[in-house]
């Protein structure tokens, strides 16, 4: 039976929730974006009959998270995702590359921990950041470089600053390291970590991630963080406080369709 791709509406809402709550970590963004950010979110389903074989959550027409079977992902990638940042499980990397091109394709690891696995790191104490620190945070992200933080990504992060948890470490009059996390009723996630090159290797990022993780686990049993899979020092630091590998993904920024359609 061929698959149908439809936009999520009330006809399929129960089936959607039944599916995503079976794995709240894997479907974290599907849950949060649809439940809490519905005015900024679209979700498309790949259906065989009335059974969901795959899902695509599109947030702010900027980020697209795609999950499902091979043929479901194939069908969902036929939607126009040009210009978006596409996230997909690594086992579908070849399928993504067959349909879209980009100069920025990253392999990302999702790390996860339960509250009882947390081993706090006692390093340089971070300070809580707020809206008064916004300019310093933007300056830090720009200093990391556009290959990691382009202007669109920075704007997306800062747009929701007041609703997030921010901590950082200052050194020599600069914001040397900063990190941001979000807490929901069912899980928390560290979204953003940045350290100026001159201040790496001092344990600053590990201290900030440890502090953010402690904040999250005070309100939920599950914490997550994304990290570049090849960033061995960061993976080592985060696993050192209790995070464990959960899944591997590919992120393609500013995707361009290979067939030239839009």
Image (spheres, rainbow, N blue to C red):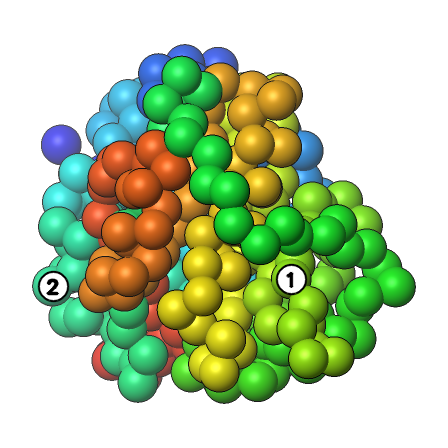
The image shows a total of numbered marks equal to 2
Where is residue 47, by image quadrant?
Answer: top left
**Rendered position, 99 above or below 34:** below
69, 122: nearer the viewer: 122
202, 174: nearer the viewer: 202
The residue wearing badge 2 is: 94
**Is residue 230 among the parts visible in the rendering?**
yes
Name the spot of residue 5 as percent of width and height, x first.
Answer: 35, 43
Q: Mark number for residue 72?
A: none
Name the spot of residue 152 as percent of width and height, x first.
Answer: 60, 75
Name the spot of residue 105 as percent of width and height, x first.
Answer: 28, 73
Instruction: Left or right? Give the position of 180 relative to 136.
Output: left
Q: Earlier in the sequence, mark 2 or mark 1?
A: 2
Name the spot of residue 217 as percent of width and height, x first.
Answer: 55, 25
Q: Residue furthest right?
A: 132
Residue visible at 62% across and 28% down in the picture: 184
């Amino acid at each position: 039976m061929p698959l149908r791709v439809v936009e999520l509406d009330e006809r399929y809402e129960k089936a959607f929730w039944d599916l995503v709550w079976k794995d709240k970590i894997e479907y974290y963004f599907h849950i949060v974006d649809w439940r809490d950010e519905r005015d900024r979110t679209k979700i498309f389903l790949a259906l065989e009959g009335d059974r969901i074989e795959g899902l695509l959550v599109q947030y702010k027409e900027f980020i697209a998270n795609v999950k499902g079977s091979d043929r479901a992902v194939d069908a969902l990638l036929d939607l126009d995702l040009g210009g978006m940042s596409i996230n997909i499980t690594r086992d579908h990397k070849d399928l993504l590359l067959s349909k879209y091109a980009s100069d920025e394709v990253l392999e990302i690891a999702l790390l996860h921990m339960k509250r009882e696995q947390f081993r706090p790191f006692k390093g340089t104490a971070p300070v809580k950041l707020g809206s008064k620190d916004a300019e310093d945070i933007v300056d830090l992200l720009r200093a990391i470089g556009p290959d990691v933080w382009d202007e669109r990504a920075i704007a997306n992060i800062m747009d929701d600053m007041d609703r997030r948890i921010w901590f950082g470490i200052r050194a020599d009059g600069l914001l040397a390291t900063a990190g941001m996390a979000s807490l929901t009723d069912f899980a928390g996630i560290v979204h953003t970590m940045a350290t100026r090159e001159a201040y790496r290797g001092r344990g600053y990022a590990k201290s900030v991630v440890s502090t953010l993780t402690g904040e999250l686990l005070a309100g939920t049993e599950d914490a997550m963080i994304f990290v570049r899979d090849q960033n061995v020092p960061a993976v080592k630091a985060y696993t050192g406080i209790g995070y464990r590998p959960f899944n591997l993904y590919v992120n393609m920024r500013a995707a361009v369709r290979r067939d030239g359609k839009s």
